[in-house]
Image: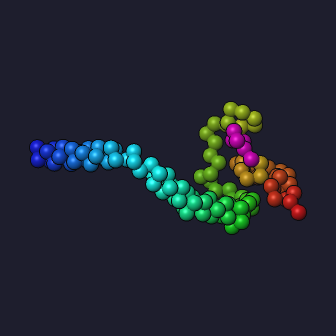
Amino acid sequence: MATSYRNLKLALQTYRRFFASKAGSASHGHGESSKTWRNAFYILGLPAVALVYWNAFHLMPQHPERPDFVAYPHLHIRNRPFPWGDGDHSLFHNPYYNATSKGYDEGSEELHPGAHHH
């Protein structure tokens, strides 16, 4: 136990000395550091943002179709009704995507987000 504590203390002293010596010489290299970060932004950052944009707006479907309702017995268990509305709709209920214990709401097919696009 004492040996591992001594080794840890020695390692921390070594790191402290290393970073303290680097701190004194860091004031002279600010230009190099800013160039490195600017290059990293252009080489790594902008392509990453472009790939995320391409994935979000061109590869992934914008409005996925809802699945067919299947009344599995373990889903929609209501020990007590919700304390708002009719007690069967959750607080952030979306009538198109969220089914109640009896299925999707009547007339919710017209609420599909992609139905109004031409």
Give whichever of 59, 65 is nearer the camera.
59
**Residue 68 shows up from this direction:** no
Please, is residue 51 above or below residue 32 in the view? Answer: below
Say which of 4 and 27 sits in front: 27
Is residue 34 found left or right of 58 in the rendered image? left
Residue 18 spot, x, y in % from top left: 27, 48
Residue 108 coordinates in the image, percent (x, y): 82, 52
Q: Main secondary structure of the magenta part?
A: loop
The location of residue 31, given as percent across then percent down, is: 47, 51
Q: Residue furthest top?
A: 83
Q: Residue at x 53, y 59 (%)?
A: 39
As displayed, is residue 36 above or below residue 17? below
Magenta span includes 104: no
Picture quarter with the N terminus: top left
**Magenta extent:** 89-94
Residue 47 visible in the picture? yes
80 with respect to 2 (left or right)? right
Check if residue 93 falls in the magenta segment: yes
Which image quarter: residue 66? bottom right
Residue 74 in the image, given as x and y percentages of width and height: 59, 52
